[in-house]
Image (cartoon, helix red, strand yellow):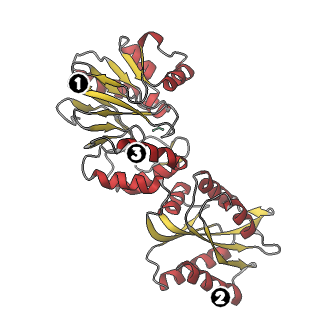
Amino acid sequence: MKLTSDVLYVGVNDHDIDLFEGQYTVPNGMAYNSYIILDEKISIFDTVDARFGKLWLQNIQAALNGATPDYLIIQHMEPDHSANIANFMDAYPQTKIVATAKAFAMMKQFFGNDYVDYRIEVKDGDTLSLGKHTLTFVTAPMVHWPEVMLSYDSYNKTLFSADAFGKFGALDAEEDWACEARRYYFGIVGKYGQQVQALLKKASGLDIQTICPLHGPILNENLSYYIGLYDTWSSYRPESEGVLIAYTSVYGNTKKAVFALADELKALGCPKVTVTDLARDDMAEAVEVAFRYDRLVLATTTYNNDIFPYMKSFIDHLTERNYQNRKVGLIENGSWAPTAAKTMTRMLEVCKGLTLCNTVVQIKSALNEESIASVKALAQELV
Ligand code: FEO
């Protein structure tokens, strides 16, 4: 696929994957993007997942049309992009590999070879002339691993952005960009907002007209929209007003309280109320929505003198991703010694800028008049 007269897409779509990175469901598959610049010197950006090496090498062979590549640029060493380095070097042994020192150290770890005779080690701000195109390398540690670098092509004003601006979903899937990009972002780099902010600062000094990420579509229109969302997400600001009610329920009594609260919030005019059952729904989607909205309600049972495991896991997902600057309400249920709210409060203490609602709904086994009144009071506080 030609992106311009001399920049080609040679990536692959994966519709066979069960879990991306061993944990994320990807109902519309995944794309592992790879690109070639056909200039006086020919450069290839990144490889693809191990299972697609043969197809990727065929794509490259077709794009090269008999020419020999000069550089394999490795922007990120996670195996969804690096798994075919050794296969590529077997096929094109004279190619020079361009990467950061940290990336070469990882090559040694993954392949037992750091290509001493074929390496061009680059650091932030280094340039590589290909002919018409000149690449400037921009390091982006922890977006998403420490060795990551991006490459800016000043000729086409294109940023090859590694994992940044990527999303779940194969390129032949018709779906909204933001939904699966947000789930991907908070799942994968949500912890590293500060580092993403540092990258956005560097990128703001570049004239970018096209973004070529390693996952998801090539972005070449309305770039301020995508960059604006990355700025919101990485600064932990809520993207929109809304309430996520995340719950677990063993026999349905906590669930009844959750839906009573949702109805109450809607009756009070709350524009967006999303309810998620943490034991049954996609956890990554729940994490995404928690970061998207400005309010969150956690409802769970006391369990083994702690809280129900799915809720524990959900709160861990939030706190390890620096969840902050939101309003939070709590609902607890317990038949003899309800302590879930206390446990959740303690788990959330590490979060900056949380406002906990004064009303804590306590259910003793099942809803009654008192706890229904408490649900209504919580709804009032949330709106
Ligand atoms: Fe797409 Fe961090 O790998």
Sooner in the amino-acid sequence: mark 3 or mark 1: 1
Whether residue 332 is visible here, answered yes or no, is yes
Determine the image quadrant of residue 338.
bottom right
Sooner in the amino-acid sequence: mark 2 or mark 1: 1
Amino acid on which the number 2 mark rests in the picture: Ala
Task: Using the numbered discs, state the Cα–Cα distance from disc 2 to disc 3 in whole angstroms.
Answer: 49 Å
Amino acid on which the number 1 mark rests in the picture: Leu
For label 2, the SS is helix
Residue 142, x across and y down, in percent: 51, 39
338 on left or right of 94? right
* Pointer 2 residue: 373
Residue 174 lies, with reference to residue 272, above or below; the image says: above
4 on left or right of 342? left
Residue drawn at point x = 35 percent, y = 15 percent: 95
For label 3, the SS is helix
Whether label 2 touches label 3, CB < 8 Å:
no
Q: Which mark is residue 288?
A: none
Mark 2 beta carbon near ligand 1 (under 8 Å): no
172 on left or right of 250? left
Q: Which mark is residue 38?
A: 1
Residue 136, x across and y down, in percent: 33, 30
Q: Are there few (<14), some (14-19), or many (20+) residues within 10 Å of tag 3?
A: few
Residue 383, x across and y down, in percent: 52, 80
For label 1, the SS is strand
**Numbered-mark total:** 3
Sooner in the amino-acid sequence: mark 2 or mark 3: 3
* Pointer 3 residue: 201
Residue 118 lies, with reference to residue 181, above or below; the image says: above
Q: Are there few (<14), some (14-19), or many (20+) residues within 10 Å of tag 1?
A: many
267 or 60, nearer to the observer: 267
Q: Are there few (<14), some (14-19), or many (20+) residues within 10 Å of tag 2?
A: few
Residue 307 lies, with reference to residue 224, above or below; the image says: below
